[in-house]
Image (cartoon, rainbow, N blue to C red):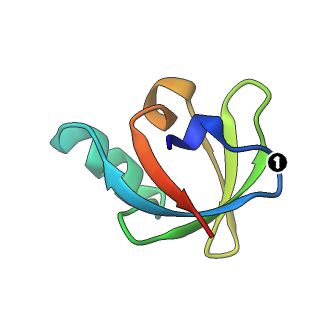
Amino acid sequence: MMLTQLKPNEKAKIVAIEGGQALRQKLALRGVNEGTFVRIISCQGPITVEVDRNVVSIGRGMASRIRVVKV
């Protein structure tokens, strides 16, 4: 399942980032890496998630390349 398919307040673990080095680097700078746990805050417009007590907004294009598993 992709990050864009989750609903607010659902928690998930990132299992894969399906993109090139540039995408991985942009996400890593925001604390979004494989193995990281996230909680969806908002799905309106950009996807807003909580990662390690930080709030991060990710564009839908980037979020559609992040594969997750619900926890």
Image coords of residue 10 (percent x, y): 75, 57
Image coords of residue 67 (percent x, y): 42, 47
Q: Residue at x 47, y 31 (%)?
A: 64
Location of residue 60 by image quarter: top right
Q: Residue at x 68, y 44 (%)?
A: 6
Location of residue 33 by image quarter: bottom left
In this rendered view, identify the residue nearer to me: 37 or 56.
Answer: 37
Quarter of the image where the C terminus is located = bottom right
* Residue farthest along the bottom direction in this orientation: 52
Callout 1 secondary element: loop
In this rendered view, identify the residue nearer to me: 43 or 5.
Answer: 5
Give above or below for 53 relative to 66: below
Q: Residue at x 61, y 75 (%)?
A: 52
Image coords of residue 19 (percent x, y): 25, 37
Query: Which residue type does callout 1 highlight?
Result: Pro
Give above or below for 49 relative to 46: below
The image shows a total of numbered marks equal to 1
For label 1, count other residues whose C-alpha is less than 10 Å away and answer few (under 14), some (14-19) or many (20+).
Answer: some
Location of residue 48 by image quarter: top right
Q: Residue at x 47, y 64 (%)?
A: 31
Q: Which residue is mark 1?
A: 8
Give above or below for 60 relative to 17: above
Image coords of residue 57 (percent x, y): 64, 43
* Residue farthest along the left direction in this orientation: 21
